[in-house]
Amino acid sequence: MVSVVYFKKALIYLGLILVTSSCQLLLKSPKPSDLSPSQLKEMDQALIYVKEKDFLKAVNIYDQLSKELRGKAVEVMMLFNSGSNYRNLGDCDKSIVRYRRMLERSLKQFPLKARGLMEIGYSYECLGDIKASFLSLKDAGDLRSYLPREVSQVIYPARLSISYSWFGKKKEADKYKSIALTGVLQIKNQYKSQPEVLKNMSRIFYFMGKSYMSKKNLKVDSFLQSFSYHQIYLLQSLFLKDKEWSLKSKKEMDLLFDKLHSVFLSANKDTKKKYKKLIQQSLEEGQKMIQMEKTLKWKTFYKKQMKKIQRLLV
C-alpha cells in the first residue's frame, strides 16, 4: 500500500516541478520498506510548500530525505526534487550539485537520466555557463527516446535552437526551430478537445521559450542572439489565451524585456551598434505577430515594451 500511495504522490509532485506538468518519469515503484510513514508525511508537507511556492522549506525536506534514503531507489527522486527547488530559489550552484548527484546515481535509469540532463542544463544556463548547458542538452539528445513525446519532439528541439543561437549559429538555430514548430503541429493532435489543446499547447510553448539565464549572469552576446527565439515561442503561448499558461508567458515576456533593457542600459556604444539591427528586426517581428492577433490588450503591452528598448537604441 505504501508503494502505491508513494508513487501516486511522487507523480503529482513531479507534475509541479518538471519542465512539462504532464511529464511522468518512468521510475520503478519503490519497495514498501523504502519509505516510512513519517517520510511519506514529510513528502506531503513538501508538496504543500511547493504549491505555496515556499521552496526553501520544501528543499530542506528533500535534502533531509535524500540523506535518509541514501542508497535506495527513491534517493534519486529526492535529489531531483531538491535540485529543482534550489533553481526555483535562484540558487543554481546548489541546484547543479543535486542534479550531479542524481545523475551519478541514475546511470541505468535512462528516463530519469534524460530528464536530469535537460534540467541540469537549465541550471547551467541560469549561471550563464552556456557551454555546459549546451553540452548537457546534447547529451540528453542521445536519450531522447526515453523522454515524453512532447519533450522529445517539441521542447527539446526548441531548447536546442536557443542553445545554438547563443553561439551565433543561426543556421542550426533556425533548423531546430523549424523542427520544433513542425513538432507542434504533430503533437497537438494527441489532445481531444479544443480547451485541452489550448491549455497544453500554451504550456508547451511556455517551456519552449522560457529564459533561465538569470539577470545577474547574463551573457550579453548570447542573450541578444537568442532573444528572438525566446520571443517567438512565448508569444505563441500568450496568444492561446489559457488562463494559467498565457499569464505565465506574459510574466516571462516581462522578464525577457527587463533583461533586454538591462543589457542595453549598461551596454557600450560598440555593443549597441553591433546588435541594434538584430534587436530592431526582432521587435518588428514581434510587432507583426502581435498585429496579426488583432487584440488591443497585446498591442498595448508590446508597444510599451518596444518603446523602452527603442529609446536605448538611439
Image (tube, grey):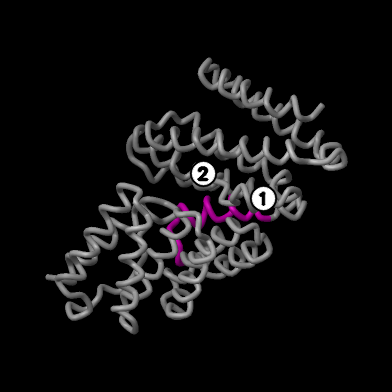
Q: Is mark 1 on a helix, strand or loop?
A: loop
Q: Is residue 161 among the parts visible in the rendering?
A: no
Please name which of the two marks, 2 or 1, marks the residue nearer to the observer: 1
Helix or strand or loop: what does disc 2 sit on?
A: helix
Amino acid, disc 1: Leu
Q: How crowded is mark 1: few (under 14 residues within 10 Å), some or many (20 or more)?
A: many
Number of numbered tags placed on the structure image? 2
Indicate left or right for 267 with 174 as reference: right
Q: Which residue lies furthest to the left in this view?
A: 1
Please state the horizontal and vertical placement of residue 86, each as a whole percent of the image: 45, 60
Name the quadrant of the C terminus.
top right
Query: Alpha carbon of mark 2 to alpha carbon of mark 1: how far?
Result: 29 Å
Residue 241, compared with residue 60, is above or below; it is: above
Please report the residue visible at 45 percent of the width from the left and 54 percent of the height from the top: 89
First reached walking from the N terminus: tag 2 or tag 1: 2
Please tell me which residue is depicted at 50% across the width and 59% down the height of the picture: 91
Q: Give the range drawn in magenta.
A: 146-163
Which residue is rendered at x = 56% and y = 35% of the image?
253
Q: Mark 2 points at which residue?
A: 184
- Depth check, front residue: 27 or 268: 268
Residue 162 is a magenta residue: yes
- Is residue 307 magenta-colored? no
Near-viewer residue (10 or 221): 221
Horizontal relation, residue 14 to residue 224: left or right: left
Q: In which quarter of the image is the N terminus?
A: bottom left
Residue 53 x %, y %: 35, 48
10 Å crowding of disc 2: few (<14), some (14-19), many (20+): some
Nearer to the camera, 121 or 271: 271
Q: Main secondary structure of the magenta part?
A: helix
Name the residue carrying label 1: 218
